[in-house]
Image: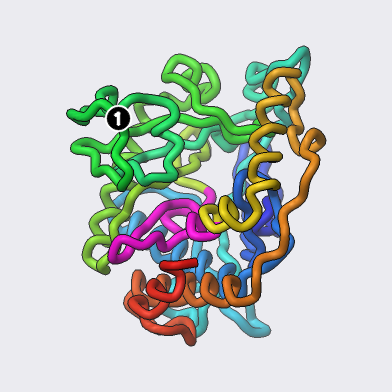
Amino acid sequence: MTSVKDLHVADAPTREAPGRGRFAFTDDYSVFDWGKMPDQIPKKGAALCTMGAYNFERLEAEGVPTHYRGVVEAGGAARVVDLDRAGTAPTEMAIDLVRVPDLPFTDGDYDYDAFHADAGSNYVVPLEIVFRNTVPVGSSLRSRGSPEAYGLDVAEWPAEPVTLANPVVEFSTKFEEQDRYVDRADADRIAGDAAVADLESLARRVNEVVTEHAEAAGFEHQDGKIECAVIDGDLVVADVVGTFDENRFAYRGQQVSKEVVRQFYKNYDPTWVEAVSEAKAEADEKGVADWRELCGASPDHLPEGVIGAVADLYGAGTNAYTDAEWFDAPDIDAAVDAVRDL
């Protein structure tokens, strides 16, 4: 399904009715939209599944509709249970399934009219809804707007994270080869029957729930995203919510997310990072969908010490966020200190 998780279909969705299936989380990861990277991070798949399930269950308790149905219990029975009955950190999540119509790319543009004509009443909304509570140093927001545009009384972005008085909500494409931010008018066209105001309202509610719990657990919730689906005409939160891959969290000023690996690569393998940037720009200029075909470099393997430190960070972070000992990992303070100077 993606570079980090697989999809298993039990009952296929149709235009008229949702189906049932499972996400199987792997230890793969992706940065800079590359897809599957050359290494795996042990414990990562189980950490994301556990944290995602924990957040889905909190959202459901708060009345936020989702496609989540439980986690798959390890062992021969493979029963679907609530997270607190799983026993060990799960790697599979049961979900409602909806359709993902083809998104044709012709004459240098994507045909969303064709996408929605084939969607029916059960489909993934082809947008990501991004919310930002802070603007970290690595945030793309800094390159797309001035501080004044977001209510800050400074002329230039500071060299440290900035907290926003009011969270910002933005819209990004989901199924294009190179995701791009779009304004509300384009988002409304791309979303089809899903109202942009409803998508924004849902994202803000998810942000509130995750941020409140993160603060209680000692984390700063900096930014994140949701993906949505329409099921029988109703809008629900889909994919996975509030994990260290989908969102940016910090603990004692240190990133606790895959941003650690993203920033490490900028110094460790700058040739590849620059080649990715150049390939994306060339693809935009030429109207080519797959920028990877234009990239003349591949990422180097991570050092073993970095892999181990990041694996411990995922495990320790999940333990701390859920207040449970799912993983044999250092405490969160030790795990954060280990990655601080990578």
Q: List x then y, in percent, for residue 269.
A: 65, 54
> Which amino acid does the dot numbered 1 rest on?
Glu
- Residue at the spot 73% in from the left edge and 19% down from the top edge: 287
Q: Is residue 244 magenta?
A: yes
Q: Is residue 80 visible?
A: no
Q: List x then y, in percent, for residue 265.
A: 59, 55
Q: Is residue 48 visible?
A: yes
Decide if residue 48 is on the left or right side of residue 14.
Answer: left
From the viewer's side, name the closer residue of 170 and 89. Answer: 170
Q: List x then y, in percent, for residue 264.
A: 54, 58
- Residue at the spot 51% in from the left edge and 70% down from the top edge: 47
Q: Is residue 129 above or below residue 246?
A: above
Q: Is residue 143 above or below residue 67?
A: above
Q: Is residue 325 magenta?
A: no
From the viewer's side, name the closer residue of 64 and 326. Answer: 326
According to the image, what is the colour scheme of the structure?
rainbow
What residue is pinned by disc 1? 156
Instruction: Specify the quadrant of the image occupied by residue 114.
Output: top right
Q: Is residue 261 above or below residue 193?
A: below
From the viewer's side, name the closer residue of 119 and 185. Answer: 185
Q: Looking at the magenta stretch, what is its main secondary structure? A: loop
Q: List x then y, in percent, for residue 78.
A: 63, 77
Instruction: Specify the quadrant of the image occupied by residue 279.
Output: top right
Crowd band around label 1 with a 10 angstrom C-alpha radius: few (<14), some (14–19), many (20+): few
Q: Which residues are magenta?
A: 239-261
- Residue at the spot 64% in from the left edge and 58% down from the top edge: 4
